[in-house]
Each structure stands twice: as structure tokens, then as C-alpha cells.
Image (cartoon, rainbow, N blue to C red):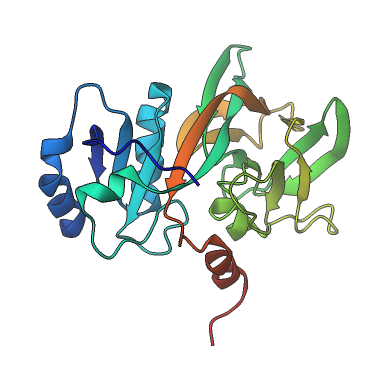
Amino acid sequence: MQTREKKSPKLLVVADPWNSDAKSLAKRFAHLESKRPDLIAVFGGDGTMLRAIRRYWRRKIPFVGVNLGHRGFLMSTVANVTPEFFTGPFIRRVSPLLEVEVTKPNGAKRRTFAFNDAHVRARTPRAGWFEVEVDGEVRIPKLVADGVLVSTAAGSTAYATAMGAHPVPIGTEVLIVVGSNVAEPRSWKHGANLPLGSEVVFRTKDSGRWRKIYGVADSASLGEVVEMRIRSSKTAKVELLFTPDHDLARKLALLQFPSQ
């Protein structure tokens, strides 16, 4: 449990511009904003938090979210937000970012980071042909699927779950690998959970580029690629703060079991 120093918080406020409640909270706490913030306050849903992380993670200060969206896996539900809320107490969870390197058809390389996930996908209506390598060993010589993804634990409740992976709590030291609409091999339907230190490589198996593949990192397009190399960063990370009553276990259960 972490309690921040009981002084006036210095905030960087991020609000969902399409949510009237979020905009109202941002206006209410505008007087706490600082040019030298020590906390990033996010009002909205998980999508708003992801946008805030992509823009501000390099500041190396914690993020705390107030859920005004749907499930809010990355947010806390707070009935009455006051200035005292921003001093805690909080539960602290740290999530490393993914280091993503792609190779373009002309051999050029591009590097970026992702908080949730990174994946390669085929252009519809054709399925893609992918090679999947883990720590230098080819695990699937030819994966026929719409795409294949690597997710952090924090991102396991997002696109990875839609692909068939099982969500895990933030902070779990795993990388999740899962395919989308896998045709071959038929037995590989729920992917794999790998040690956090693993390196995963996806490559096209169609050298003629008839089945082109495209890279994506946290929903940001990386264009056509022939290879994507993904590993958990040892230095780039995000610190998320949650209220003590943030019931992540209950939220994960709701995601995995149908409601009555």
C-alpha cells in the first residue's frame, strides 16, 4: 500500500474529451495542475488511460485513473473525487512496456514501444502465413491465421482476450502470445504464456508478398512489415495506482464468465 505525501497534489490532468463527466472533473481540478506534475490524473475509461500512457509514459511519474467508462481495468471507481483522493492510499502496480522492432520490406527498421500489445495481421480477405519464433527457436513454422499478437499482462484484458487468451492480473510476469482466427495448426487456439524475459519474433512466410502482413503497436499502424521482434523492456515501464478497493479479481471474473 502506498500513501503519497499529504500535500497539495501537482497534477497533469487527462480527460476523455467526449465524456461530459470527465470534462467536468478536469475543470474542477484544473487548479491543481502544475508545470512540474508528480501525478497524472486520468478521467475516462481504459481508452483514455492508454492514450495518456502513450503520450506521457516518458515522464516517469505515476498514473491514477477515475473510471467513467465501461469495465475500467486500468482505472479505479471513485464515488466522490476530492483533492484528498490524489494523496492515496493506493495500491501500486508496475507494468513494463514492450520493445517492438519491425523490419520493412526494403530492410529498413523501425523501433517503438507498446503498453498493451503488438501484433502482425494479414490484409483481409486472405489469411496470413506467419512463422513464430521464441528465444531463437522456431515454435510454429507456419501459422495460418488472420494475425498473431504479443500482449503484456496489462493488455491481456483487451485484444488478447478477444483472440481467445485468458486475462491475467497486471504485474503478472508473463508475455501472452495468441493468434486470431487460427486455421493451422488447429490445436493452437488459446496461444501460450511465456516467461517475461522471452523474445518473440513473427515473420512472414510468403516471400512473394502476395499475403502481405502489417504491424500494429497499441493500435498504431506500423505499415507493411516482413518481421516483428518483441521483448519486454528492462527500463521502460509504467506505474499505475489503484484505490485499495479496486477489485481486479472480480473484473477478471466478469470478463471470463457469462453474466446471469
Q: Does residue 252 appear to the left or right of 69 in the view shown?
A: right
Quadrant occupied by the C terminus: bottom right
192 on left or right of 160: right
Point 52% across, 66% down: residue: 251
Q: Which residue appears at 65% of the width and 49% of the height?
A: 146
The quarter of the picture where residue 176 lies is: top right
Residue that lies at the very extreme toward the bottom in this rendered image: 260
Residue 243 at what x, y percent from top left?
A: 42, 54
Residue furthest front as drawn: 6
Say if residue 16 shows up in the picture: no
Q: Does residue 175 lie above or below 251 as drawn? A: above
Q: Is residue 77 visible?
A: yes
Kindly identify the residue that appears in the image at 50 percent across and 47 percent down: 1
Label count reads 0
Indicate the position of residue 11 as horizontal and vertical percent values.
24, 34
Q: In x, y percent, where is residue 7?
A: 25, 35
